[in-house]
Amino acid sequence: MEKRIVYLDNNATTRVDDRVVKKMEIYFTKFYGNPSSLYDLGFEAKNAVEDARKKISKILNCSDQEIFFTGSGTESDNIAIKGVARRYQKKGKHIITSSIEHHAVLNSVEYLGKKEGFEYSLVKVDSDGIVDIDHLKSLIRPDTILISIMYANNETGAIQPIEEIGKIAREKGIYFHTDAVQAAGKLSLDVKKLNVDMLSLSGHKFHAPKGVGILYKRTGINPIPLFHGGHHEKNLRPSTENVPYMVGIAEALEIAYDEFEEHKKHIYKLKMMLKEGIEKNIDGLVLNTPKNSVFNTLNYSFKGIEGESILFSLNDFKISVSTGSACTSGSLEPSHVIMAMGREDSISHGSIRFSLSKYNTEEEIKYTIEKLKEVVERIRKISPYKV
Amino acid sequence: MYSKTVMEHFRNPHNYGKMENPDGFGRVGNPQCGDEMIIYIKVKDNVIVDVKFETFGCVAAIASSSITTDLIKGKTIEEALKITNKDVVNELGGLPAIKTHCSVLAEDGIKAAIEDYKKKKLKENNND
Ligand SMILES: Cc1ncc(COP(=O)(O)O)c(C=O)c1O
Ligand SMILES: [Zn+2]
């Protein structure tokens, strides 16, 4: 047991499913054609890409013409936000997003604000890390053209009221984008039900490779592309198609929703086991994950301890987790997400995220609880803050 | 990311814990920056005979605290005041650039503890 890695950082990235690797393989070595080429090798590749697109559109309940492949979740977010803001700026130059977004969204909006004359407002979240709808409504102005709110938060797992926000945006004629990167395989991605105009996904969060993303874009919305080149992806994202990865991301998404109930049951059970184990064995906790959260994510702060010291100590036991501590971020700022929830500084520095996947086992969770207890007790002895 | 020495000091820090009735006490850093350190010293005939620390902070802050207590133990007040964060980093076998501020905290900690000691001594002398 001691030697194997216990990987509890699945919101950072995931292991690629063997079935996905297998499915992709022939598109590297056998059907390696360029989908634009007019001979069989090209047709095979083209068919593979279009089949992948269809598979994805079924899960998102949209037309395959509304599915676009991109290079990552970050790229999908950038195309949606910068592309729509630039295209529709004549209508208005105000954007609304939340204080807990991923940097792919926050920094895109901030860039538009700093460099391209847009204005933006950040919606507050409550102490559970869920956006305040009334505050959002109060921020809407006649010149608001875009709202971007994430579906599930990467640090806390908190689920945001996307359906409701989508309804508000639609009534007001404002475009609505959601970063659903942390929702894939965990929540319904039915874009009709969610009332979204655009939705971003990233392959490596659901057992597909890194460096491939999806953007759902409702027909009729025309973001200005970030790149200019060939006609690929209807000019929205030119580049010769990454055929194996497109096949891979579709396969992974299909597996995630075919086996949804089974994985949900398994992972949620492990999450509850971890939660009960931590709460029974360790004092001085602050729970940063609300009840209404994705089933794989659990985030705690351990009073009196800074997060990085827990992370490195757990790594000594081959347990992988992540932290919102400033000292690991390079920015010297603690997690903006935990801070936005109104936690004290020392609590924000001490947050530890456990994010599970279908590959985790009960044995791993038991081992983690045992080691975590040891680690917290050890580091608390060094701390001036006593619990 | 961290040197072997840093990890050794982090895993088994030297001289940690609270000291009862220290001759000098320094508290530096703040929860906002994420690292906070207390240094306690006992002084006899101008020599630091005992030292302890308590730290809330990252791996680098805990390792810096630990090695600093080793560095100043047995030193005279004047010698201890000469120790800088560069010495701390060197003794640790280097720190990642973004972690330099964690070693500065250790230097500040020593200075604060010695200042406190001097203040207390001055008061005692005045009372004599
Ligand atoms: C919520 C969220 N959005 C966007 C991203 C960025 O995705 P990618 O790593 O594919 O660029 C991530 C993951 O890092 C994420 O968690
Ligand atoms: Zn630090």
Image (cartoon, coloured by chain):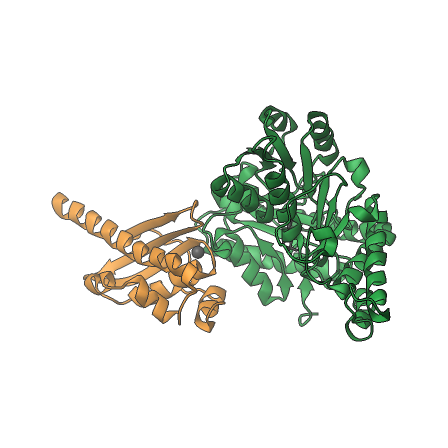
Chain colours: A green, B orange
Quarter occupied by residue B15: bottom left
Left or right, B118 with respect to A245, comes to left
Image quadrant of ligand 2?
A: bottom left
The residue depicted at 67 percent of the width and 50 percent of the height is A76
Q: Quadrant of the N terminus of chain A?
A: bottom right
The residue depicted at 59 percent of the width and 25 percent of the height is A141
Residue A169 spot, x, y in % from top left: 69, 30
Left or right, A122 with respect to B18, comes to right
Residue A359 spot, x, y in % from top left: 77, 61
The residue depicted at 62 percent of the width and 43 percent of the height is A81
Whether residue B109 appears in this view of the structure is yes
Residue A220 spot, x, y in % from top left: 75, 38
Residue A9 spot, x, y in % from top left: 66, 57
Whether residue A154 appears in this view of the structure is no
Left or right, B53 with respect to A310, comes to left
Observer-nearest residue: A150 or B99?
A: A150
Q: In the rendered view, would you say A100 is above or below A253?
A: above
- Please tell me how many numbered marks the rendered image carries: 0
